[in-house]
C-alpha cells in the first residue's frame, strides 16, 4: 500500500477528475475505496503529501551506499531499473533504430521488431547477480540487530 500522503494525493486527483469528467457510476466506487484507504490510519486532513521516492526521504542509491551494497546497486539494480522504467538509453538499445536518411539528422525511429532484452549471456549474468544479491542480503542481515534487542550503535 502506498504511503498515506500518496493515497491522499490520489484521492485529491481522483476527486478533481470526477468533477471534470462526470460519471457517477464509475467515480463513486473508486472515490469511496480511495477515501477508505486514505483515512485508514490517520485522517487525510492530518496527512502531509510528500513526493519523495521513499518514506525516509533518502534515495535508493544512498541507501545502497550506506548498506555497503553500492556495487550491487550500480551493476544490477541501476541497469535493471532503466529497463523496467523504459528510460531513454534502454529504449534506444532495445526498441529504436536510427533513421539512415542524413537529411533527417539520424533521428530515432521505432524498430519494426523489438530486440530481446535477454541475450545469450544474460542467463549466466542474471544468476551471478542473483547470487551476489543473496550474499549481500545475508551479509547485511547478519549485521542487523535482532528483533527485540537494542542496537549497539
Image (spheres, grey):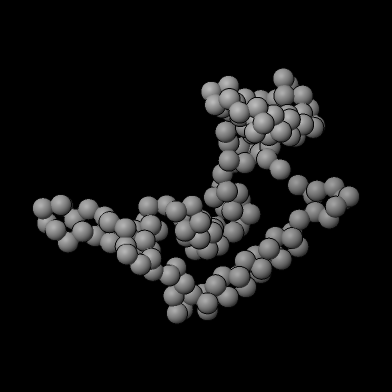
> Which one is in front, 151 or 90?
90
Residue sticking out furthest to the left: 103
Q: In this rendering, would 79 be left or right of 150?
A: left
Q: In this rendering, would 16 be left or right of 139?
A: left
Residue 41 visible here: yes
Q: In the image, is residue 106 above or below residue 4? A: below
Q: In the image, is residue 90 above or below residue 43? A: below
The residue located at (32%, 64%) in the rendering is: 112
Residue 8 percent coordinates (x, y):
67, 29
Quarter occupied by residue 109: bottom left
Q: In this rendering, would 28 be left or right of 150?
A: left
Residue sticking out furthest to the right: 148
Quarter occupied by residue 22: top right
Q: In the image, is residue 60 above or below residue 45? A: below
Residue 5 visible here: no
Quarter occupied by residue 55: top right
Amino acid at each position: 500500500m502506498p504511503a498515506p500522503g500518496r493515497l491522499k494525493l490520489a484521492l485529491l486527483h481522483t476527486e478533481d477528475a470526477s468533477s471534470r469528467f462526470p460519471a457517477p457510476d464509475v467515480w463513486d466506487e473508486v472515490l469511496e475505496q480511495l477515501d477508505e484507504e486514505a483515512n485508514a490510519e490517520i485522517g487525510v486532513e492530518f496527512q502531509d503529501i510528500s513526493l519523495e521516492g521513499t518514506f525516509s526521504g533518502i534515495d535508493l542509491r544512498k541507501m545502497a551506499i550506506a548498506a555497503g551494497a553500492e556495487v550491487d546497486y550500480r551493476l544490477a539494480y541501476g541497469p535493471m531499473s532503466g529497463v523496467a522504467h523504459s528510460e531513454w538509453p534502454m529504449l534506444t538499445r532495445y526498441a529504436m533504430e536510427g533513421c539512415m536518411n542524413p537529411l533527417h539528422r539520424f533521428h530515432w525511429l521505432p524498430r519494426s521488431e523489438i530486440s530481446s532484452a535477454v541475450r545469450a549471456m544474460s542467463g549466466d549474468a542474471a544468476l551471478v547477480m542473483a547470487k551476489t544479491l543473496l550474499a549481500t542480503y545475508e551479509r547485511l542481515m547478519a549485521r542487523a540487530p535482532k528483533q527485540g534487542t537494542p542496537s549497539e550503535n
